[in-house]
Amino acid sequence: MGTSIEGAPTALTAKSEAAPLRVQVGNNRKIMIRLMNASAAVSIAFVLLLSFWLRPGPRGFGTHEQLLLHPCAFHEMTGLPCPSCGMTTAFAHMARWQIHDAFSAQPLGALGFLGCVLLLPLAIGATVFGIDLLRIGRRLPWKWIGWMFGLMFLLAWIFKLSIFLNR
């Protein structure tokens, strides 16, 4: 804090010393927003690139094993596909624009790939322009979105089971 000639603090010097701190905090927030957006963009791009690299599994599931992950334990125990079986395969098919095969493998996975394709330019744009996506995201009706996603997940599993059982 600044002092006058007599040694007493002055209001003018106190304000001038505090102002750079506010500017610094504001700049840090903008940098953090851009870093979060850039991290989201890089993550989405990585998933899309990985989808191009993976070869879709011929069974309609199991593509994740190319990433050295274990086979589906649910499938090995029950002989039936689990609710998320085929997600990676659907992404790999969509990367090749094999839309029918992608939806047959896992409809929600095919939609998830399309969501990533749409979100990538949004995340890049938000990074460039410094848009706070978290602030926007807080305004979304998450309870409703959660219920809709859960219902879509259940319907996708029922679809996957019907395809699997009719082979």
Image: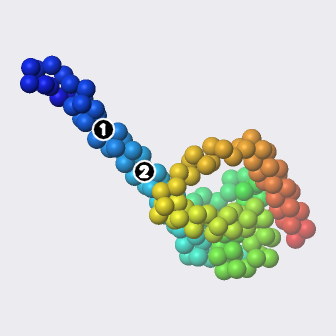
Question: Residue 50, labelled with which disc?
Answer: none
Residue at (68% x, 53% y) in the render:
73
The residue nearer to you, when weighing 110 against 41, is: 41
Relative height, residue 68 to residue 92 (above, below): above
- Label 2 Cα neighbours within 10 Å, binned few <14 / some 14-19 / many ≥20: some
Relative height, residue 154 to residue 119 (above, below): above
Residue at (53% x, 65% y) in the render:
125
Q: Which residue is the site of mark 2?
A: 30
**Quarter of the image with the N terminus in it:** top left
Q: Nearer the viewer, mark 2 or mark 1?
A: 1
Furthest-left residue in view?
A: 5
- Relative to 51, 11 lies left or right: left
Residue at (24% x, 35% y) in the render:
17
Q: Position of residue 134 (x, y in %)?
A: 56, 48
Q: Which residue is the site of mark 1?
A: 19
Gap between marks 2 and 1 measured at Cα: 17 Å
Q: Position of residue 79 (x, y in %)?
A: 79, 58
- Relative to 142, 166 lies left or right: right
Tag 1 or tag 2, which sits nearer the N-term?
1
The residue nearer to you, when weighing 133 against 41, is: 133
**Quarter of the image with the C terminus in it:** bottom right
